[in-house]
Image: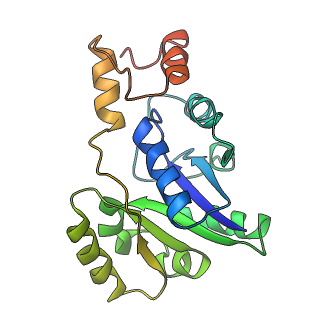
Amino acid sequence: MRIGIMGGTFNPVHNAHLIIAENAREEYSLDKVIFITGGNPPHKKSNVTAQHRFNMTRIAIKDNKFFTDDDFEINLSQKSYTVNTLRYLKDKYPCDDLFFIIGEDSLVNFKDWYMPEKILKMCSILVFPRVSHSGLADTIKKVKLHFEGNIMAVHSPIMEISSTDIRKRFKEGRTIKYLVPEGVIEYIKDNHLYKE
């Protein structure tokens, strides 16, 4: 099987995450995409529990038969690093090809990730654009000068949707309709998230 991996803090998960995962799935003939909610990522802090973020992600993906989730990272007590998550997935899916989906902004900083060479030995990287398609090609080329492995572009529309903006809008009492799946909006309201 060809398995996509969509990792993120998902605080909250939003429609751009879903569109990017679906475009990557179609373009690279992925059999499924696993959403992995970051439990304790080394570079981000969250005032919403990992369980809440995982629950929202599960709600967001439930209508797509090609999407599934995994709670590996939210059950870790220590910091969650991509290389460790990939080791876990390689053990779980030893005969399958893994495709890790990231944004162009993450690829720019790839050299600063924990064990980037090992990450590229375990999976191919699919990169979606943040600025422009021509810029993405240059970014991929620069990273390939330093690392061996498969790094490929996802031809997805550039969407200016961010979890930070969604949290801000919600706190200010502004609409987040069409930015976030309806079920996730209901979950946020029912659990009184993002009020502070």
From the viewer's perspective, tell me whether residue 77 is left or right of residue 114: right
Q: Residue at x 44, y 35 (%)?
A: 14
Q: Residue at x 30, y 45 (%)?
A: 159
State the image coordinates of residue 135 (x, y, percent, origin top left).
21, 69
91 or 31, which is in the foreground?
Answer: 31
Q: Quadrant of the C terminus?
A: top left
From the viewer's perspective, tell me whether residue 13 is left or right of residue 133: right
Is 64 located above or below residue 115 in the figure?
A: above
Residue 45 visible to the viewer: no
Rendered image coloring scheme: rainbow
40 or 183, which is in the foreground?
Answer: 183
Q: Residue at x 61, y 77 (%)?
A: 122
State the image coordinates of residue 133 (x, y, percent, origin top left).
25, 65
State the image coordinates of residue 161 (x, y, percent, origin top left).
31, 38
77 or 56, which is in the foreground?
Answer: 56
153 or 91, which is in the foreground?
Answer: 153
Task: Write down the quadrant of residue 84 in the picture.
Answer: bottom right
Is 143 located above or below residue 24 in the figure?
A: below
Q: Residue at x 26, y 42 (%)?
A: 160
Is 48 located above or below residue 193 in the figure?
A: below
State the image coordinates of residue 148 (x, y, percent, origin top left).
45, 88
